[in-house]
Image (cartoon, rainbow, N blue to C red):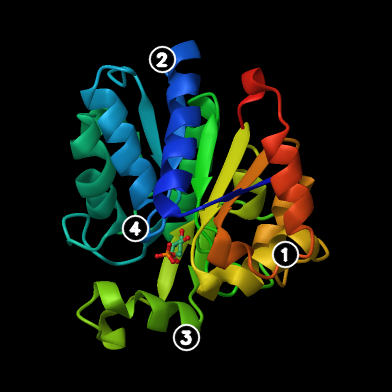
């Protein structure tokens, strides 16, 4: 995998938005897999700026959701569907008709998971999947010890993830659902390009395990090592525990200009 160390979150957002814009110039109908959480926000802001300036056109782009809470009504402000509408679709001027995601309110949750996996494949697969990372190394909501071959399915959140996410629910862990639907690790690995952004020292252990640790279900993000085109973009804080940091800096500084990430 390629590791790019950037000075700060804004630079990371601009680098990744640049790669998304480049993809859209070659494939205007690209299916973009998007993630929630605080980390990807600079990506969405940078991409929206490129759209406003006319540098890229997103009118034919399609957006796919990574994960969703089970049981929150779609219109709940913290359902990931609502979050993505607010933070990604509206700023980019993309309508909900170009959006696909799992149904977290379905009575038949298993059927909804299978339907979403099928829908992603029928849509031609995700071209570029954005990922954040949990402090425990989760991607999407694939908590530690998730099968590296898993498909979209229901998962139970760890207490740590519920504590981390309580900030979106008035700081009240009681409001954070216990269950979620997430694209499985096997599903995520089918995207053509995986781009993980991590910022801040709080993610340094998870990033080190992802990049330099063994491929192991205990750190779900380490599955990125199995992907032929995975890019991990980190700021100095998140890079602070990487033994190969100098090598990563050297290789990025010496890349041919045409290569991109
Ligand atoms: C949630 C999301 C993940 C995200 C993680 C980290 O658990 N399901 O997709 O990567 O939070 O969020 P943050 O970027 O806010 O640290």
Q: SS of the residue at dot 1?
A: loop
**Residue 159, which numbered label?**
3
Residue at numbered disc 1: 242
Labels 4 and 1 touching (C-beta < 8 A): no
Residue at numbered disc 4: 104
- Pinpoint residue 126: horizontal percent, then vertical percent: 53, 32
Quadrant containing ligand 1 reads bottom left
- Indicate which disc, 1 or 3, sits on the residue closer to the N terminus: 3
Q: SS of the residue at dot 3?
A: helix
Q: CA distance from mark 4 to mark 2?
A: 29 Å
Using the image, determine if residue 156 lies above or below residue 132: below
- Indicate which disc, 3 or 2, sits on the residue closer to the N terminus: 2
Q: What residue is at 70 percent from the left and 62 percent from the top?
A: 210
Q: CA distance from mark 4 to mark 1?
A: 37 Å
Using the image, determine if residue 144 lies above or below residue 99: below
Q: Quadrant of residue 60?
A: top left
Whether residue 143 is visible to the viewer of this picture, yes or no, is no
Q: CA distance from mark 3 to mark 2?
A: 40 Å
Quarter of the image that includes the N terminus: top right
Residue 86 is left or right of residue 71, and the answer is left
Q: SS of the residue at dot 2?
A: loop
Q: CA distance from mark 1 to mark 2?
A: 36 Å
Front-most of residues 107 and 64? 64
Q: What residue is at 70 percent from the left and 47 percent from the top?
A: 249
């Amino acid at each position: 995998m390629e590791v790019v160390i950037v000075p700060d979150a804004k630079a990371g957002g601009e680098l990744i938005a640049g790669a998304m814009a480049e993809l859209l110039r070659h494939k205007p109908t690209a299916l973009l897999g998007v993630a929630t959480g605080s980390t990807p926000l600079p990506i969405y802001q940078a991409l929206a700026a490129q759209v406003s300036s006319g540098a890229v056109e997103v009118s034919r782009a399609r957006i796919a959701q990574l994960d969703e809470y089970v049981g929150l009504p779609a219109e709940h402000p913290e359902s990931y569907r609502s979050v993505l509408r607010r933070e990604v679709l509206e700023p980019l001027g993309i309508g909900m008709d170009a959006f696909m995601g799992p149904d977290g309110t379905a009575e038949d949750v298993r059927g909804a998971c299978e339907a979403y996996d099928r829908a992603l494949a029928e849509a031609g697969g995700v071209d570029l999947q954005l990922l954040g990372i949990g402090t425990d190394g989760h991607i999407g909501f694939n908590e530690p010890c998730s099968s590296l071959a898993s498909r979209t399915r229901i998962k139970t959140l760890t207490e740590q993830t519920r504590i981390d996410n309580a900030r979106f629910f008035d700081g009240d862990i009681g409001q954070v659902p216990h269950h979620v639907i997430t694209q499985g690790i096997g599903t995520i690995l089918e995207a053509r390009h995986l781009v993980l952004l991590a910022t801040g020292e709080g993610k340094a252990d998870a990033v080190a395990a992802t990049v330099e640790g063994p491929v192991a279900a205990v750190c779900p993000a380490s599955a990125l090592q199995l992907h032929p085109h995975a890019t991990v973009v980190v700021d100095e804080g998140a890079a602070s525990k990487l033994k190969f940091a100098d090598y990563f800096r050297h290789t990025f500084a010496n890349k041919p200009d045409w290569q991109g990430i």
